[in-house]
Image (cartoon, rainbow, N blue to C red):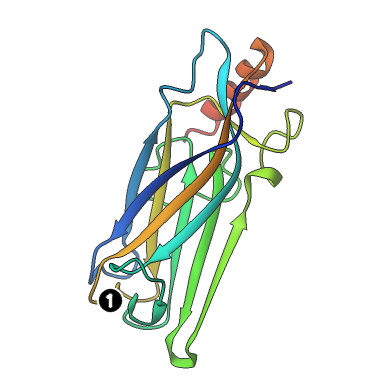
Amino acid sequence: MATAKTGSFYLTERVNLTNASADGSRFQGSIDLGAYVNVATGQAIAIDSVDFIWQTPDGGGNPAGMVAGNASLGAQLVDLNPGTAFTFADDQSLIASGSLAIDQSNNIATHTTDLYPDNFGPTSLSEAFMVVNDTLYLVVGNDGAAIGAANISCTARIRARVVKLSSKDWMAIAIQSTASDN
């Protein structure tokens, strides 16, 4: 069982989607967890929640000019490096995913988070997603249309805690994590 060593804190990472990037483009950023994860002491990160925030260059959120037509902007947070590719929902490294669907013709934008850490993590440990790897990866991309005339930012805001795991639990998570490495 995991025991908390810290209260909740936030980690953030922002990735830019470059203006005029073609339909299907993917971009990646990373978050170094080396200061929090320690194999010798069984220290890991418990991720309680992840929010994806989409913004225009001025920090606003008007989706009208984000894409060149009807499109979807997607984001995934994973704990194994997928390169600049999205992973499928059955991949054990997937921590959270979400999208912003933009229907320019009807002036509608819909933001959804498909997957929350509390319903996909190892349920025998807690309601959080336990991370024993030393890096998180944020992959974002556009589908359906090119990015508009300006860069678009996606920020992942991650609420986490440092936890201590028993050696059995730490090893089980490490095995599960590396087993999903394709």
Query: Circle 1 sits in a helix, a strand or a loop, which is it?
Result: loop
Q: Residue furthest top?
A: 40
- Residue 61 horizontal side relative to residue 40, left or right: left
Indicate whether 123 appears above or below 94.
Answer: above
Image coordinates for residue 73, horizontal then vertical, percent: 43, 67
Number of marks present in the image shown = 1
Image coordinates for residue 146, horizontal then vertical, percent: 30, 74
Q: Relative to the observer, which residue lies in front, 6 or 29? A: 6
Residue at left offset 76%, top offset 29%: 124
Indicate whether 56 appears above or below 105.
Answer: above
Q: Residue furthest bottom?
A: 105
Q: Relative to the observer, which residue lies in front, 180 or 161? A: 161
| Residue 135 placement: quadrant | top left
Q: Relative to the observer, which residue lies in front, 170 or 51? A: 51
Q: Relative to the observer, which residue lies in front, 124 or 33? A: 33
Residue denoted by label 1: 148
Q: Identify residue type, mark 1.
A: Gly
Indicate whether 60 appears above or below 40.
Answer: below
Within 10 angstroms of label 1, few (less than 14), some, or many (20 or more) residues?
Answer: many
Residue at left offset 36%, top offset 40%: 30
User: Quadrant where the N terminus lies?
Assistant: top right
